[in-house]
Amino acid sequence: MLPSSTVENYLKALYQAESSLEDKALVPMGQLATAVGVAPGTATTMVKALAESGLVDYEPYVGVRLSSAGTKLAALVLRRHRLIEQFLVEVMGMSWAEVHEDAEQLEHVVSDRLVERMDAMLGHPSVDPHGDPIPTADGNIAAPDYHSLLTCPLHTAVRVTRVTDQDASFLRFLEKQHLKPGHSLEVEVRDSAADSVQLRTGAGLRITIGTQAASKVLIEVS
Amino acid sequence: MLPSSTVENYLKALYQAESSLEDKALVPMGQLATAVGVAPGTATTMVKALAESGLVDYEPYVGVRLSSAGTKLAALVLRRHRLIEQFLVEVMGMSWAEVHEDAEQLEHVVSDRLVERMDAMLGHPSVDPHGDPIPTADGNIAAPDYHSLLTCPLHTAVRVTRVTDQDASFLRFLEKQHLKPGHSLEVEVRDSAADSVQLRTGAGLRITIGTQAASKVLIEVS
DNA sequence: TTCTATATTTTGAGTTGTCAAAACAGAACT
DNA sequence: AGTTCTGTTTTGACAACTCAAAATATAGAA
Ligand SMILES: [Mn+2]
Ligand SMILES: [Mn+2]
Ligand SMILES: [Mn+2]
Ligand SMILES: [Mn+2]
């Protein structure tokens, strides 16, 4: 009846894969396998079991999509994950660069009691330390679409609101460059030939980063 | 290389079984099976695997004992369990009656980083909310031997220091009767025929409890 | 339309942890 | 000593999850 950690991880991976995909599209098996970190055949087997339990819709050779039951469950796992990250940073004083791995485990074992207490203690936060929105207890999530450092207007004050990569060394880099969510900056030059983006941080420093990195830093025009 | 939750639970159960047993004695298979909540044959299979990994010494038809490696590991699991309980009570404001179940799961997934942060935040506590001693990071544990309400002198002021039962309703009962660790009382009558112990709490109330219950409330003469 | 590259599924096998029930060992009674 | 009781081990089976490698489907190139 209650889903195992494994099932929760598959659902969460699907949820996140779907959100960076056109509506109604199916997630291809290979992508899911990669996201979960498992061989393709393993994902196929698992997905058939999930379909059996009514958590996903599965079209052989095409892909998978969460059912409404699956979506709800995935959102709750994501809620736990992000509340835990926020808790680890705000209450435990851990670095935003290192909380992801801890949350990845804790998300499967924290009780509802504990999660709701963390939520209350944090004042019902709407985003986690990386700016990722936290789903509500009934499974709803705010889905704003941001600009990134790749798509925002040039020479305009913008504020970092979200970082879509959990890699610790990337996060540490951003922190050192004052590019954590909340900080302001302007994009000065985009050079597609050089595959780079040049920007000036609030502290006045000029930094050049690659377009891959730039696309992972989401902003809001301020 | 790293022990699964299952292995950790077996080791912890052994550790606790050994501590309420004469030195050098082996824990019988049946007792371990009951403690872990598993069929006898399952325990046998598991214990053979643990012996293979050098975590226990196993004598067929006699019993099991933790090796020194196993003892160390078990102590660390117990350390995590008890620090988590203390954290949930002191920081999260949860009730001492309900933290055990949460800790039972969390003990297997919290990182060293997180445990050490909790420990620091709590001021390196020596006991958990039930008065159980917390092993140090290197696996040492204080092993004081207490009196219980069954063995302590009569008509003498004593203080509750430890409760050796995790049952939520029992803990709630003790709380309601002001018998949590720290509270004072006197034992007035022991009636072995009636299988009961009569006591007067610090608040002056007279309570009668069964000897089973009394044996689980450990005290210190104050 | 036939071939080919790529993604997906199937197959066969392995690991970990579990149970029920049969077989067995050791200790205690008669 | 022989029998009975109790606890332990063995056996055979199963569930969940995984992989490597063979088989197959689909779509795009020739
Ligand atoms: Mn996870
Ligand atoms: Mn996050
Ligand atoms: Mn446990
Ligand atoms: Mn405790």
Image (tube, coloured by chain):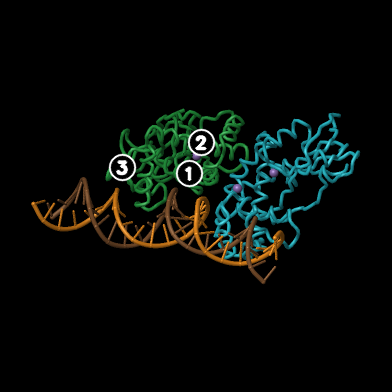
Chain colours: A cyan, B green, C brown, D orange
Q: How many marks?
A: 3
Can you tell which quarter of the image residue A178 is in? Answer: top right
Which quarter of the image is occupied by the N terminus of chain A? bottom right
Residue located at (71% from left, 36% from top)? A171
Task: Estimate the x, y position of residue A21 in percent, counting from the top left.
Answer: 74, 56
Tag 1, which secondary structure? loop
As rendered, which of B121 and A99 lies closer to the eye? A99
Q: Residue at x 81, y 32 (%)?
A: A207
- Dot 1: within a 10 Å radius of its alpha carbon, few (fewer than 14), some, or many (20 or more) residues? few
- The residue pinned by badge 3 equals B63
Q: Earlier in the sequence, mark 2 or mark 1?
A: 1
Q: Amino acid at mark 1?
A: Ser
Please tell me which of labels 3 and 2 falls first in the chain: 3
Mark closer to the chain start, 1 or 3? 1
Q: Are marks 1 and 3 on the same chain?
A: yes
Label 2 neighbour load within 10 Å: few <14, some 14-19, many 20+ = some
Considering the numbered disc 2 on the image, is that residue within a helix, a strand or a loop?
loop
* Residue type, numbered disc 2: Pro
- Outermost residue to the right: A155
Inter-mark Cα distance, 1 to 3: 22 Å
Residue type highlighted by circle 3:
Gly
> In the image, what residue occupies the spot 81% across and 48% down?
A146
Q: Which residue is mark 2?
A: B181
Mark 1: C-beta under 8 Å from nearest atom of ligand 3: no
Q: Which residue is mark 1?
A: B4
Residue at mark 2 to residue at mark 1: CA–CA distance? 33 Å
Any part of residue B198 in sight = no
Please state the horizontal and vertical placement of residue A103, each as a whole percent of the image: 63, 43
